[in-house]
Amino acid sequence: MSNDPQAPENELDPSLFEAPPMGEQERMVEAVLFASADPVTIKDLTARLPHGSDPTTALVHLEKRYEGRGVRLVRVGEAFAFRTAPDLSFLMRRETVETRKLSRAAIETLAIIAYHQPVTRAEIEEIRGVGVSRGTIDQLLEMEWIRIGRRRMTPGRPVTFVVTEGFLDHFSLESARDLPGLKELRAAGLLDNRPPPSGAETEGEAPSESEEGDLFDGDAALGSDAPDPPDGAR
């Protein structure tokens, strides 16, 4: 109860009420995640749940409860969401494939940003060896797969680009650190397994331009393959 004698009688201190049982908190978190179109952060869950609730523990319990089910509780950056189990994603592909195509320039630019973030436009152009059009950057920004990061403390204060949680969610990644390396990509058949010619890059160095273009099928489709590291960053 408020100590202010002028405060309304119905103004109650939320700390006077006990938090709901953990089972009820799990149900609340589950409902919020199912109803949300976007991944939800612990901060958002804390704001929605009754005072004293522990959404972090509720998420741990939910994650265990959904193990082996058709949907799983996954972490997307700093947020959480329910997603189709990876081994069942083939059932959803027909429904989730979008018709939008990514140009080769957009594919290469996205791969460079993913593996080198934060990266400036000039650095992208240096890695690709050609200029990057404004349209390419705008397309990736419009798809919400990249966003503008912090400005570099260098002459001109250029902006940097980083991938978004939407990109991580689309490719089922918890963070950019989960992007595959060259060995994993070759093992999955996404890169040419033939040995490089004499003088070509070695393991850990940049793959050729032809390799970069093979990592996406050009469709913004759920379960698409992750981009190849254009400059060996891991």
Image: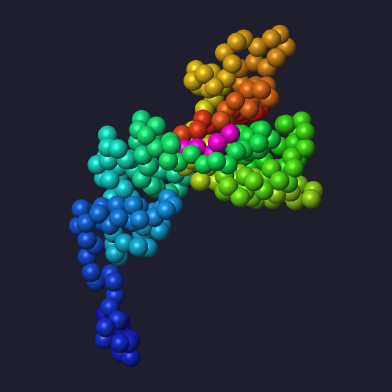
Quarter of the view holding residue 211: top right
Quadrant of the frame with the N terminus: bottom left
Q: Nearer the viewer, residue 74 or 137?
A: 137
- Residue 162 drawn at (x, y percent): 61, 44
Q: Taking 94 as reference, is 117 left or right?
A: right
Residue furthest toward the right?
155
Q: Residue at x 57, y 44 (%)?
A: 145
- Residue 52 drawn at (x, y percent): 29, 62
* Residue 152 appears in the rendering: no
- Residue 43 drawn at (x, y percent): 41, 57
What range is drawn magenta here? 218-222
Q: Taking 37 as reference, is 142 left or right?
A: right
Q: Residue at x 49, y 20 (%)?
A: 188
Q: Is residue 3 magenta?
A: no
Residue furthest toward the bottom?
6
Q: Main secondary structure of the magenta part?
A: loop
Quarter of the view holding residue 108: top right
Q: Nearer the viewer, residue 131 or 233?
A: 131
- Residue 171 drawn at (x, y percent): 48, 37
Q: Is residue 221 magenta?
A: yes
Total labels: the figure holds: 0
Quarter of the view holding residue 74: top left
Quadrant of the frame with the C terminus: top right
Q: Residue at x 26, y 83 (%)?
A: 10
Is the image coloured rainbow, by chain, by secondary structure, or in one colour?
rainbow
